[in-house]
Image (cartoon, rainbow, N blue to C red):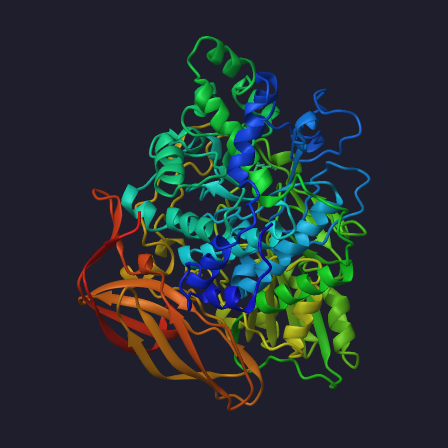
Amino acid sequence: MATKLTRRSFAKLTGSVPLTASATQVAAQTSSSKPADPSPDERARETEQKMTDDERFSLLISLMGAVAAVGVPRDKRIPEGVSMSAGYTPGVPRLGIPALQSSDASMGVTNPGYRPNDKGATAFPASIAVGASFNPQLAHEGGAAIGREARMRGFNIMLAGGINLTRDPRNGRNYEYYSEDPWVSAVFGAEAVNGIQSEGVISTLKHYVLNCNETNRHWLDAIIDPAALRESDLLAFQIAIERSQPGAIMSGYNKVNGTYASGNSHLLNDVLKGAWGYKGYAMSDWGAVPAWDYALSGLDQESGIQLDVMQWGAEAFTDRLRAAYARGKFPKERLSDMVRRILRSAYAIGIDRWGPAPTLDMAKHNEIALEISRQGIVLLKNDGVLPVATGGKLKIAVIGGHAQEGIICGTGSGAVLPVGGFAGVVKIGGPGIMGGGRNMFLIAPSPLAELTKLLPDAKFEFDPGYTPAEAALLARRSDLVIAFGIRVEGEGFDNADLSLPWGQDAVIDAVANTNPNTVVVLETGNPASMPWRGKVRAIVQAWYPGQAGSQAIAEVLTGTVNPSGRLPITFPLDLAQTPRPGLPGLGTPWGTPITIRYDEGAEVGYRWYAQKNQKPMYAFGHGLSYASFSYRELEVQGGETVTAAFIVTNTGARAGTDVPQVYLTAVNGDERLRLLGFGRIALQPNESKRVSVEADPRLLARFDGGAGRWRIAAGRYRVAVGRSAQDLALSADVQLSARLFGV
Ligand code: BGC
């Protein structure tokens, strides 16, 4: 089983300690005189040798549970009594191989209509909120809680660990991903996986790779320079795999440079299993396998096989793969390899050795959800109106966003049914296979209720934001306006632009024109355009904050909690600033082949804006506090990599937590922006602490496609520490020697 998070392993998270195990640890592992237990590889080999071909083939597919919204009926191959889930693979009881059962897990253990009797799970904040906390330990704790809730349901595979980079601020699934930065994505994805696997449950990392838009995702050809891919999305996977050893990797729906990711031998065989030596198994996304020969290209398991019938007209890894086997086109060695990889993950993570299910402490899980939303909320703007003074007899207008009912979450396979059910469900719909399940889910308690608790002397009134004129009437007779802006984003859909739906921008504009004391709270998975930005006094980015999100929002607004989240994704001024002002394929009917060129290559997000000299609305890493922080005494050391140390001081009047960020800004005078690491430091007023960050050397290097290795050029590396990618306070130079390393 995976290890618990120790002080030392946590110290590694921000990059301050080398990744390799210490010499003492290795010696302790090898000097034991007891005969060693067979390794997961040995066990997998032994078991696989005892299997019949029928048993071998039975492990190569998973069956999706019945879901009315997607039009999938109950499959007779799922035995009676087996609870419905995203994927079911029968076990082989005579050999002690358990059935495999998977569930989605981006925001908790999901139930997109699978199990009518499910009592609900903890609805955690979205991954983008976890990323915004810049606190990897929270990803670990959330992961472990998800692992426990999965075990209670008998699910031994979590489809978690979404680490696609947020390349496009319209991507409907960015809420399921952590960041636009490869290092942040890798560290958080790895900790989510480590948390889940510490409970003896397999986790995926997904969607391998470059599944960065939802529009016509099954027909999307994502084009990118191969070396740039190694330095960006693939680097996130590489580092996350090293740090967490996930049992499975889920391949994406899209093509990469002309070949479907699930049948892409270069990505699966050469890179994942070859260069990186990955020992687990590659499962497809649901409905991503048109052909049996994907098995030859490195895919080990066909998932949710009924969706392949809906999508491509046939199953791939059942009769067709068996026919190829009979004809000698599909070698026995590869069949054995696929089976062994699946068994190896089962043994390495221990899903065959489960004892009794852990007792669940749902109150503790709620505390974890609460802490993530507290730390993930980002205060974007504040001219001093926040925190709202408690104790006053203020007349406060709460406007829009269903803030009298609950908070919203993302839609799609990641939606979680909370304990007690949803406070409301509004059907949205839309074209394509995901349209039927595209809903606005409301999760109680409401922000209005939580604000009322924390401000008992204030007089609250609610207006639904039905029309601008009506909302302005309430704004006029109030001392303070708290307006909620929401946008349901989700799987299968990209946002057509960055505006808020249902006329909310006009409502916010009208109330801000009427009452200058307006604060806006946003529940979105992506940047919003905020045309009213200059008229409001404060803006709070709450993302999809999960079941305890309303409490966290109220705590941040009233100052019970000092905000400490930072943007893990750049908020552009408008789409014209982004690499693709127009999104290819947007608006084409479901089923239209489309091509998106990710010509920004490795210059994703903040790197792009720096390269183009663009000043975004809010930079990557930005986030305000009710305290303030200063930096001094930056010292940078070279060698195999770069280590930066500096002192952070709380110069404000109240306790707060800072997230100082260390960037590479130039190499031999050429600008190149790369986040090298970050800290997360709690400080009392006037308190100072020293922070040290050691960079993963790949963040300083370029990938040399010819050599298949990382290359550090000799020369002068400029390193800076700052509050965001565009607010750098100190910088220093360090000399590095030329070096070729890694793969
Ligand atoms: C999604 C995956 C998910 C799978 C199973 C697919 O539509 O892309 O992320 O894990 O469904 O629900």
Q: Nearer the viewer, residue 247 or 485?
A: 247
Relative horizontal placement of residue 697, taking residue 436 as reference (left or right): left
Q: Looking at the image, which residue sits at the far top?
A: 327
Residue in view at x 57 percent, y 48 percent? 489
Residue in view at x 66 percent, y 51 percent? 146
Q: Is residue 270 above or below residue 397?
A: above
Residue in view at x 22 percent, y 44 percent? 707
Tag count in the figure?
0
Q: Position of residue 81 (x, y in %)?
A: 80, 29
Visible residue check, residue 195: yes
Residue in view at x 79 percent, y 82 percent? 457
Q: Nearer the viewer, residue 198 or 494?
A: 198
Relative horizontal placement of residue 218, taking residue 676 as reference (left or right): right
Relative horizontal placement of residue 78, taking residue 485 as reference (left or right): right
Q: Position of residue 621 (x, y in %)?
A: 44, 67
Q: Nearer the viewer, residue 291 or 357?
A: 357
Quadrant position of residue 691: bottom left
Q: Position of residue 67 (x, y in %)?
A: 70, 31
Quadrant position of residue 576: bottom left
